[in-house]
Image (cartoon, rainbow, N blue to C red):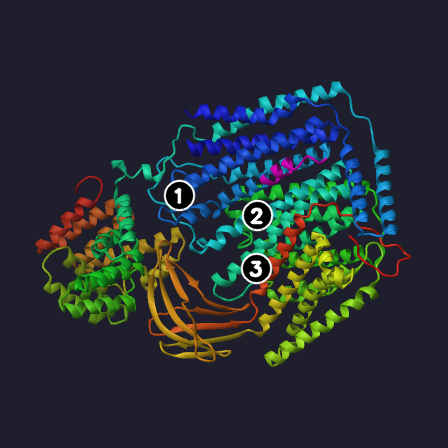
Amino acid sequence: MIVELGHFALILGFAVALFQATIPLWGAIRGDAVLARLGAQAALVHFALLALAFAALTHAYLVSDFSVLNVFQNSHSLKPLIYKWSGVWGNHEGSMLLWVLILALFGAGVAVFSKRLPDDMLGATLGVQGLIASAFCAFLIFASNPFLRMPNPPIEGRDLNPVLQDPGLAIHPPLLYLGYVGFSIVFSFAAAALVLGRVDAAFARMIRPWTLAAWITLTLGIAMGSYWAYYELGWGGYWFWDPVENASLMPWLTGTALLHSAIVLEKREALKTWTILLAVVTFSLSLLGTFLVRSGVLTSVHAFAVDPERGLFILLILIAFIGGSFALFAARASALQGGGLFAPISREGALVFNNLFLSVASLAVFVGTLYPLLLEALTGAKISVGPPFFNLTAVPLMVPLFLAIPFGQKLAWKRGDLLGAGQRLWTCMALGVAGAAISAYAAGGGPVLALAGIGLGIFLVLGALDDLLDRALRGGIGMIGARLRAIPQSITAMALAHAGAGLMVIGISATAFETEKIAAMKPGETMALDGYTLRLEGIGPVTGPNYNAIAAEFSLRDAAGTELARLRPAKRVYIGRQMPTSEVGRYRHGLSEIYLAIGETSDGQHVDLRAYHKPYVLLIWLGPLLMSIGGILSLFDRRLRIGVPARRARLRPEPAE
Amino acid sequence: MFWLPVLVLILVAILLALWPLLRGRGPVDPLDQAVAFYQARKVELERQHAAGQIGDADFEAAMAEQGRHLLALGRGRGQVSGDVAARRRRKIAALAMLVLVPGITLAVYLRIGQPGLPDLPLASRAVTPQNMDVASALQRIEQHLARNPEDGRGYEVVAPVYLRAGRFADAAFAYRKVIALLGPTAQRHADLGEALVAEKDGIVTAEAREAFEKAVALEPGFAKARFYLALLLEQDGNRPAAIEKLTALAAELGTGPGRMRVEAEIARMRTEPGGPAGGPASEAGQSIAALPEAERQAAIRSMVDQLDARLSGSGGTIGEWQRLIRARLVLDEPDKAREALGRARVALAGEPDSLKILEQLAGEIPGKAP
């Protein structure tokens, strides 16, 4: 009965979403506050119903109710408990239910924090959110229903793909979805603003927490996915420019641009149409990303033909929302009032620069990801756009952007002084160059680009921290403590996020200095790796709960001969699906890692070993982590933000809060 | 019992969704909150100014900006619409929630839902006897083995079940465990080899050969292992040696299914033109298997017709006749099968053993007895 109640709750939630999509929107357009406020109530009810449905499906997974087709196809009674939980979203139907649940969560969030929202804005926003929710509930119910039943179910299920049986992948999809779907509410706000014709500082203030929340989770989700690929796939890579990864990177790039342009809108009431456009584009890219991955278009264009009903449904939703929102934008954008003026050299100008480069980088990724698919769909020709394309387009676009960040932080609102900003940054730049030189000396030379990258990263980190230092010193040496405490949380947040970007640049550049060694080793043999010594102690079978593995045991010694660790890379074969996976052995020292992966061992006498020494590799993920911490700090800074304009007469530019 | 909670769910949802309508509230100017926002910004600026974070000149410029926004908002202020239209809109909203929402939900749910179907959690199922089929028994043993991975007897029980169920890799794994836990015997090694051969669609791999060789080493005369090692000879291209080994093996075996199997292989090797081991593993077989369905049927039929013509002309062994009759049955030609059976009876009239086999075959042919 629980299963059927869940199914019923899902359908009732769909009907409530239809209500939410029509009545409050109507009320908002007619200026009827009571009707508009109904949106908040409907959004809460909709969320509660979907939560009920999700709980019912989860319950079916936990008790292995194989009369539910979805549970039978993706679960197994012997699966460890955590994977019974994560198995709920480890498949198409369940993950779509989670998608819609998160959509409802954001709607409910707006409803709860709606006290200070104008009634009509609330009604229109939740109305648009209701439209999105109805479309996806319909897709879920009619084309991907997770509650379909089998009258005479088998006694055992088919198990979850072993690659997905990993704690990292248990939390990665929900995080990524929180990010993707979080931009839906920003989109709804933007559409509402277009409908009502009001885009101002108050609007930017409304969308700030939602944009930040979506951006933080998307950042964490992407970083976690990258980290998972690093330790689970056994190749030691962290980013493959794989279409699935690109699909999440595109909304991240435009979302980051949106985050910055919304600051300009809130503080200076400029960039109105641009901010709205970014909100629309970001969510469109999220939709595109979700469905490129979900519909299987990415692995093969022909996946649409495999399930025409599902593919067509997805296509219709995409066309309706992306086309509809752009049409609305075209019709209403001109009705928005122009915003504040600013000089090209100013904080606003720097943020426009940022937006420009982020958007073009996103466009480059978009072309590189979709052009091959389009070509294959139209002509049948298969071409592959690999890392070289992205390294030549998206990556060079990021370099001027990163270079400009510290300058932008120092420019004043409305009109700034580039020379004045530059003066303080000379020191940071010099330190960056020195850092690059020291790395070159320590590594005995190295690729010029990688050294330049390290210099750039150091410049970014120091430039970000210098801003804090600058503010702390403004009141004289004796006042440092007091000034530091007086620094608004949002300024610290900005410094941390930008420093995080710098750390990531250093980590990525440092991969050029990694050492890779490949050898076939017999027990007792040793291998030297950058001052460390690896000795193969033995090879043996290991029996896990639902897999068998061949593991090799290595001892790791430093130059002095002290044993540092025992590393056990392995090849696992999962019994249920006969799928091999690799387990790598890792030893962390500081921010660097020794990384071991073994190949097949057919005879049990020797192993094919790939060993890496990866200096500062952890910075690649610590950087984004720091960025998210910056985002969280900013999220909890609830003050109003007003960009105080710099006056023409001022000589000493100083970005004020 | 199912419809009661459903009713409660619908009622609660409607009540919660329409709550603001029940309370009622006067008309509000949509710009009120916007005005309050700019007022709040003024207060924030004053706070920052008082705290010494911004200078006098900056403060004045910023305050002036807020003032301009407030003025602009004031110009946009309109009249709030009247009561009559509002009341009509609220009636429509309430009606939509009361009628359309339950209506749509029930219409959709009754079409795709299964209101009568109870939950079937696994824990509640295993005890009922109608579920105790092979699959669930197997599952029980698997659970037991997962907890007691050192139970060799358990693996020995499930291994043949796996083999019959077509789970060859699992069967091979189970036999390996049996050998590791209970010690090697010729039988166990040969069974492991058989599972490995089945896993690879009849090809005797190096791994399988190793298993058979171990079996023969433990017990030189072990028939199953010798049989597969002979097949391996054929697979390696030495068909005469294979036939010789199999013939020797057949001579040692008493009558029974084992010997029949060996003789069928000998017969196949003698008649089949060229090529290595039987079925689609041969080159001709593979090219036939690659053909489209209709052409494949035609190709098979022509091969069977050739065999038929040869046997009618020059006669053949019981194995060959058997193959012909079986082939006719597979091709769904019971009449031709029956006719071939008649000719076989005549051709093999002097061999009582063969006649016995033919009588068994006759039982397999559907339709009227000849």
**Mark 3: secondary structure:** loop
Tell me if mark 1 has few (under 14), some (14-19) or many (20+) residues whose alpha carbon lies within 10 angstroms of its own. Answer: many
Residue range in magenta is A105-117
Q: Which numbered dot is residue A241?
A: none
Label 3 belongs to which residue? A242
For the point 56% across and 50% down, which residue is it?
A175
For the point 67% across and 77% down, which residue is it?
A437
Q: Nearer the viewer, residue A578 or B324?
A: A578
* Left or right relative to A254: residue A515: left
**Could you tell me what secondary structure mostly forms the magenta stretch?**
helix
Q: Nearer the viewer, residue B151 or B272?
A: B151
In the orientation shown, which residue stands out farthest toward the front? A478
Quadrant position of residue A627: bottom right
* Left or right relative to A603: residue B96: right
Protein chain holding label 3: A
Label 1 belongs to which residue? A72
* Left or right relative to A67: residue A291: right
The answer to whether dots 2 and 1 both sit on one chain is: yes
